[in-house]
Amino acid sequence: VRLTYADIGRHAGVSTATVSRALANKEGVSAEVAERVRLSAQALGYRGNNAARALRRRQADAIGLVISDVENPFFATIARAVQRVAAQHGHAMLLCNTDESAGNERLYLHMMLGESVAGVITVPSLDDPAPFVELRDAGIPAVIADRVVRGGSFDSVLVDHRAGAREVVEHLVSHGHEHLGVIMINTAETGGRERMLGCRDAIEAHPGVRLTVREGPTVQAGGVAHTWELGERLARELMDLPDRPTALFCANNLLCLGALRGLRAAGLRVPEDVALAGFDDEPFFDLIDPPLTAAAQPVEEIGRMAAELLYARIADPGRVARSVVVPAQLRVRASCGCSAEGRVT
Amino acid sequence: VRLTYADIGRHAGVSTATVSRALANKEGVSAEVAERVRLSAQALGYRGNNAARALRRRQADAIGLVISDVENPFFATIARAVQRVAAQHGHAMLLCNTDESAGNERLYLHMMLGESVAGVITVPSLDDPAPFVELRDAGIPAVIADRVVRGGSFDSVLVDHRAGAREVVEHLVSHGHEHLGVIMINTAETGGRERMLGCRDAIEAHPGVRLTVREGPTVQAGGVAHTWELGERLARELMDLPDRPTALFCANNLLCLGALRGLRAAGLRVPEDVALAGFDDEPFFDLIDPPLTAAAQPVEEIGRMAAELLYARIADPGRVARSVVVPAQLRVRASCGCSAEGRVT
DNA sequence: CTGAAAGCGCTTACAG
DNA sequence: CTGAAAGCGCTTACAG
């Protein structure tokens, strides 16, 4: 017993065409009739049918967000920021978690085509531009957030992962460490690759310093708990080395937390026995024992700007692709060996 | 240039009806023809049109999740669990953040009607059954998670907030505290109300013990950062009292973290100067300084079970409403004053 | 400013 | 097992 425009039209004494125009606030309806239609719709308790509208307009009032896992607070913040902007535009948000799997990512991006979504925002796990080109060919704008997809020019919000990682590692080196352990995220995607390059950049000017790198398999597979465990395991592996590093750099938030747990379990004090620093900050990092030093991405901005780029393109499909680059910012706390006041000691 | 069943039918030499049946794996198509249709669809690169299907079937291949804020890790875990189950059923998930506003909640629940969603899962901010009844009347099943909506019987996953809160507060009392500060979430919804009752239960048997309660305005409004600040501010307020409490109970994860920050800023040591315990556990609580004692809700299970209840009802709309009750579990760590081994000292 | 009518791309009852 | 045809509820070009 769903109400339709025919019901409203009957009630207001107008055609369905007029109902449509009135409810969509279109030009060409007398103010009086428009008001009457709106009143009728309200009186009858009209609810709308987005499927019918989407079918006819060939576009849904929704956007898609494809990330690896909302349970990671980094992505949760992105999701919140994107949803906020979408809501301002009267759009719903379809949330897809790929678990950092290329297969899932293709699947969901493909699903977006079927949903006739107005646009999609992705933090891509893969470096393959094909799905994005396909989206574009279907007239669906896509924005890439936080990572890079090569072989196509897309609207994107980029973070300088490389400089961020370099800064953290340089900071560790400035504490006098000569052997650093690195717990890396998947270097198959640009975030990981760039962070790895940043590590190498940092030691280049310091001939005596070396890196021992451990990279887990695709990080998010198995969920957030798995990444914690990975960090824990890799930290212990590095500490079990006969020639163990004196400082650890972890390439993301969860790995860093996991590593800290691993170090504790091994009876090692941070920073006295091993220094620790990470990439990605969290609001609770200053409450951790010890407070964690990390390169902070401006996460909320990344999400918001990605959404704004998307809506700018929806408004003007012809504009040239734009890349916004935002810096990561080193937040020095105590886990690197600095004093509480943030001084190198 | 979107492909339709007509294109596939032409390619495979069959009608659109047969294409539909073949691609939906329905009975009544010869295996040979079905295979031919599938091959044609693949060869042509058919993408589907969910809007058309939803319009015709009067139901979208999607479910809705209405929560207050994914940025709160509690809700992020719920979202992840729900999305996982939805994906198993080939459904997309529409994520709505209400910021704990009754108006937004009604808006989004209403939007779900327009989306012709197959079902919705809500952690409701309000105690008003009306929108859920409306959903039901429209044939859309709704499951209530983590909280209670009175005045209607719905499928729901309930946590015993009251017993959980009682346990935490009793534990604090067992440390010998006689004046407890309580930083409360919104008691307009059942989670808050029940947790408050649990606090009162706990002191009932202890005539010498009293509570000083502070309740913020609707908690999530203004986002997660605002809840942190609220916890911080209320903790300081309680500590500024001439007759200050010697222990604090915080009614959720973010308030507890905020309170800890407030206590630190006030130069107070936890648990030496004030004991602290919360409701809702997080995976990183054991890494906090000091490790936080809290009642843990089985969050992933709550999300998963809510989704399973939803799909059970979608499969059998006639079944009676079912409530699953899960317990909160006290996790004793050091912030309450226990030793590292979890003993009352 | 307003309406009649076509059509978006599916699914399904009906007929064969 | 297969097809012709109606119809889901909108929007929009066209005509007036």
Image (spheres, coloured by chain):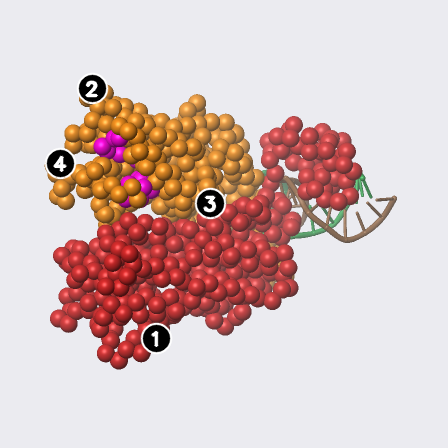
Chain colours: A red, B orange, C green, D brown
The residue singled out by tag 1 in the image is A201
- Mark nearer the N terminus (2 vs 4): 2
Q: Quadrant of the N terminus of chain B?
A: bottom right
State yes or no: discs 4 and 1 in contact (Cβ < 8 Å): no
Name the disc covering residue B207, or none: 2
The residue singled out by tag 4 in the image is B344
- Between B164 and B316, the residue placed more toward the observer is B164
**Label 3 crowd (10 A; few <14 / some 14-19 / many >=20):** many
Q: CA distance from mark 2 to mark 4?
A: 21 Å
Name the disc covering residue B95, or none: 3
- Between B92 and B165, the residue placed more toward the observer is B165
Kind of residue indicated by mark 1: Asp
Q: CA distance from mark 1 to mark 3?
A: 41 Å
Residue furthest to the front: B242
Q: CA distance from mark 3 to mark 2?
A: 46 Å
Q: CA distance from mark 2 to mark 1?
A: 65 Å
Q: Give me the residue at 19% from left, 21% from top.
A: B208
- Mark nearer the N terminus (3 vs 2): 3
